[in-house]
Amino acid sequence: MKDWLSDRLAAGPVSFADLYRDAREAGFGIAYLYKVREMIGVDELGSKRSLAWTLSLDDSD
């Protein structure tokens, strides 16, 4: 799933709604999606209504 999420976010921010839908279709649960988000360094943009995820630009980790 790390590769899947990294690939999805490689071109820039993706709406959380799209990520969630695609993750479910790929057989991944939401808890695992959030766990991988922490593992690879993903930032949230926007608000609850228009939330998007993007790869973090902070390389200090």
Image (cartoon, helix red, strand yellow):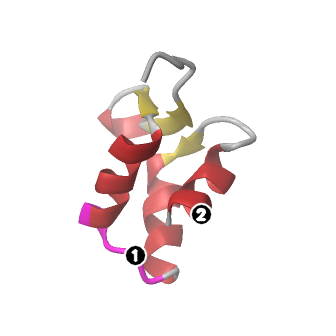
Identity of the residue drawn at 52% across and 80% down: 26
Q: Quadrant of residue 42?
A: top left
| Amino acid identity at mark 1 | Phe
Identity of the residue drawn at 38% across and 45% down: 39
Residue 35 in percent (x, y) is at 29, 54
Residue 46 in percent (x, y) is at 42, 26
Is 29 within the magenta?
yes
In the displayed structure, does residue 47 sit left or right of residue 14? left
The quadrant in which the C terminus is found is top left
Residue 40 against residue 29 in the figure, above or below: above
The local secondary structure at tag 1 comes to: loop
Q: Quadrant of residue 45?
A: top left
In the displayed structure, does residue 17 sit left or right of residue 49? right
Residue 2 in percent (x, y) is at 51, 58
The local secondary structure at tag 2 comes to: helix
Q: Residues within 10 Å of mark 2 (few under 14, many from 20)?
A: few
| Amino acid identity at mark 2 | Trp
Magenta stretch, overall SS:
loop
Q: Which residue is mark 1?
A: 28
Residue 40 in percent (x, y) is at 46, 43
Residue 24 against residue 57 in the figure, above or below: below
Among all residues in the image, which is located at the extreme front?
Answer: 61
Q: Residues within 10 Å of mark 1 (few under 14, many from 20)?
A: some
Q: Quadrant of residue 7?
A: bottom right
Identity of the residue drawn at 52% across and 27% down: 56
Which numbered circle lies on residue 4? 2
Sequence-first tag of 2 and 1: 2
Q: Which residues are magenta?
A: 27-31
Q: Is the C-beta separation of discs 2 and 1 under 8 Å?
A: yes
Is 52 within the magenta?
no
